Image: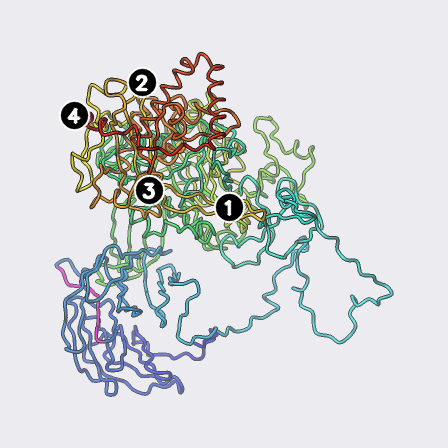
Amino acid sequence: MARGGLIIFDYLLDESEDMHSLLLTDSSTLLVGGLQNHILEIDLNTVQETQKYAVETPGVTIMRQTNRFFFCGHTSGKVSLRDLRTFKVEHEFDAFSGSLSDFDVHGNLLAACGFSSRLTGLACDRFLKVYDLRMMRAITPLQVHVDPAFLRFIPTYTSRLAIISQSGQCQFCEPTGLANPADIFHVNPVGPLLMTFDVSASKQALAFGDSEGCVHLWTDSPEPSFNPYSRETEFALPCLVDSLPPLDWSQDLLPLSLIPVPLTTDTLLSDWPAANSAPAPRRAPPVDAEILRTMKKVGFIGYAPNPRTRLRNQIPYRLKESDSEFDSFSQVTESPIGREEEPHLHMVSKKYRKVTIKYSKLGLEDFDFKHYNKTLFAGLEPHIPNAYCNCMIQVLYFLEPVRCLIQNHLCQKEFCLACELGFLFHMLDLSRGDPCQGSNFLRAFRTIPEASALGLILADSDEASGKGNLARLIQRWNRFILTQLHQDMQELEVPQAYRGAGGSFCSSGDSVIGQLFSCEMENCSLCRCGSETVRASSTLLFTLSYPEDKTGKNCDFAQVLKRSICLEQNTQAWCDNCEKYQPTIQTRNIRHLPDILVINCEVNSLKEADFWRVQAEVAFKMAIKKRGGEISKNKEFALADWKELGSPEGMLMCPSIEELKNVWLPFSIRMKMTKNKGLDVCNWTDGDEMQWGPARAEEEHGVYVYDLMATVVHILDSRTGGSLVAHIKVGETYHQRKEGVTHQQWYLFNDFLIEPIDKHEAVQFDMNWKVPAILYYIKRNLNSKYNLNIKNPIEASVLLAEASLARKQRKTHTTFIPLMLNEMPQVGDLVGLDAEFVTLNEEEAELRSDGTKSTIKPSQMSVARITCVRGQGPNEGIPFIDDYISTQEQVVDYLTQYSGIKPGDLDAKISSKHLTTLKSTYLKLRFLIDIGVKFVGHGLQKDFRVINLMVPKDQVLDTVYLFHMPRKRMISLRFLAWYFLDLKIQGETHDSIEDARTALQLYRKYLELSKNGTEPESFHKVLKGLYEKGRKMDWKVPEPEGQTSPKSAAVFSSVLAL
């Protein structure tokens, strides 16, 4: 075959010859080997067989060549080394007792993988055989952590080996070293198995071929070089007549130069003489309203930042006004599924666009979140790394059984996603419309090796630019989070959580996630020899498998779903009877349906997108015809026409024509388990329920109705790189608890933007910009099966004494005294709190044209020290919590001047502080919040935000706001302590014990000055005097002659005496 893809010649072999391997020895000679006892040499210039070499051991399936030998791998497990001229055997290695799978040669090393004989047959050997070609003997075998099926040397800086398993696991290691489990990556094949693997000649690219015929390409750079001195492939020119795309005359910006015009020397019709024509330049388009709004004039020149709504120096001219529903800028989208089609103009509705937080000098305090969310539901902030999963967190939260059962979970594992998700759900429960952030959950998520191996952890640059395919990413995240939650909760036995008839399905070994999502199946493999293998398995979600015939015929969603659940496919699999890989028919039968049906849509190519688009058009036509009407050419109906299309009884409301467009997904589906292990699936409508009656009575006969609860969609927006949003149906139970009303409503969740929508909008997918990714269907009456009571799992024992993680921490360094059992806090008790932080990522900002600074992304902070002091009793002012938080993430700045944290304080190997995990200290604070104590501190809003806690406002006494006048500046704790308490604190560095104790004293002073809040006028005069003094002093505390900090040695000696 030529470089351009044209076939140069075909060479027919004898039918009795079964060839398996090719080797191009030079530019004109080809060796062909197989299961015969000879190898053919073919001259590519004359296309003639020039030589036939006899081999003593038949079955040559792999051939390699170096400057010393030909290497032949045999099915018997042997590798023979042959002379380059005579092809005679020089050496032979007996590598494996069963069969050889693959081998490769580099320099003086030969590495092979294969199968060893066992009592039950052949088994994949996890020891790679390595041979030294200088001494012609084996050296120490290399043990790997995957089942090796293919291997290649990748000699870049070192002689690395890439070992691949058929399931998609990939491990890199040195042939003479030890294999590290951390070097395992995973290929996500379309088919179940990888069938081939190779490395480019430049060693910059890896290619994997799977059983579905797809090739997966991995590279180490965006633009790799595949061959040394490579040049571009010369493809054959296509026939222009057959490949011309249809032109859409309705597009205003369509370039007419796409129309091919023959070359002619005659005068064209458009060449009008100058007397009959006059130049008419286009009018300049209006300046973007965003530019005018942000423009600042200096003299007669205006300066404004670039709103980045279009490419530089390009201004589109519009011939008609845009629709008022959309903003006034056009966008050229990437193809929803790639770059396979011509880009076209489209508009994304404003509420679906990516929302960003605009930061000011006060950070988030003056940002109006209420403008984006007028409900009492809590949104999620998007500025945290890997916050692309916000929409899926909301979906899991509004699944009532998941929300309740996750919050009942608590374990001792430091980074447990189930625990962190339960903490986040608790924050969403407490919020009354204020946004939350999942920083602790995402922090634990980043520490899990599987998440990194699956490519779920994005770099900041990739997330900001939208380089990753968000649809594929969120579907992989969906599979990962369900599996991880299932594993995290599997160890805890919760028999009271499920009240249904469970049998083996609800055994104590299963988790509540398994009870909700798991679907039990039987996988049958039928070989062509007649042997059948059946094994039981379970899955937590399904992936849609689309029919090959994607023409315009009607295909219900229920049919596609049944095909995906009861999947039947032909693939290569190992047959124990035949003792080799054979084509097998694999089928899947359902034994038990899940309570929550999770579906990954897998719309990853133009074919799937066209399938959804065509099916929506067919469903639209059928819906109109079913009601007795016809679709007019302009697709508009008069009011009288719509009245005629309504039902004669007037029982069902007729949807508008806009609600019928782009709809293929049903709101409900009906599933029935048949006696012969089959499954019937059909779309279910309200009319079907009126005809057949409610579905609850049919559940006894294996009939279940599933209602659509959520859809996660990928918004394609080239201006912002795209985003992910969710449509969620919020049920009566949650509405009753949150808003005191009993109704169901669909909502759009776009990070912190939450807006009620019509139910038809949740299933409308315009594939130009709105692509479905994940679907959640739940069984009707699901909540009645589960105990939805939330029992707080955090007990008072978390406040008792605990061991430090630091190896060098001693009792003499203890700065706090844990609470005794008789000191446990009660409702309304005061607790002084202060926290110190370190910086993980620096702030990203840009300088505007007028010289002001605009924050693009705030610095990412992590809590490093948390201190709580007693607020009453004989030990008032003495700390009972002073925890330094261990972190595994890289610290950019310890902020020692402001935090008092020094390098090494957070390292368990060298720290002398009381070091704990974030989860341990978080549980202590959660217990204090749940018990109802009141926290006293200075700037607590930021502290709780970084710690990732939601505290009711009536439990926070913040001295920043107690000593603050409206529309005036906030006053520092240091100045307040000097002015009211005559204390000079925070001399060289900050200390959280000192700050927490000072805040408590300031609160006592506030009660004294305001007479417990009964005399606001007199306190107002005190504040006026405070601000006048501050302006005179420029808000600076005079330098002390001697250190007079309230944290003195006498205080700590009394602490140690206790």
Res. 624 image quadrant: top right
Hey, what amino acid is under mark 2? Val
The location of residue 130, given as percent across then percent down, is 18, 69
User: Which image quarter is the N terminus in?
Assistant: bottom left
Q: Nearer the viewer, mark 1 or mark 3?
A: 3
Numbered tag placed on residue 1057 in the rendering: 4
Which class describes the residues within 10 Å of circle 4: few (<14), some (14-19), or many (20+)?
few
Which class describes the residues within 10 Å of circle 3: few (<14), some (14-19), or many (20+)?
some
Residue highlighted by disc 3: 896
Res. 512 image quadrant: top left
The location of residue 966, given as percent across then percent down, is 51, 25
Image: magenta residue range: 108-118
Residue at mark 3 to residue at mark 2: CA–CA distance: 35 Å
Q: Is residue 191 magenta?
A: no
Residue at mark 2 to residue at mark 4: CA–CA distance: 29 Å
1 and 3 marks in contact (CB < 8 Å): no
Residue highlighted by disc 2: 827
Hey, what amino acid is under mark 3? Thr
Residue highlighted by disc 1: 715
Looking at the image, can residue 697 be seen?
no
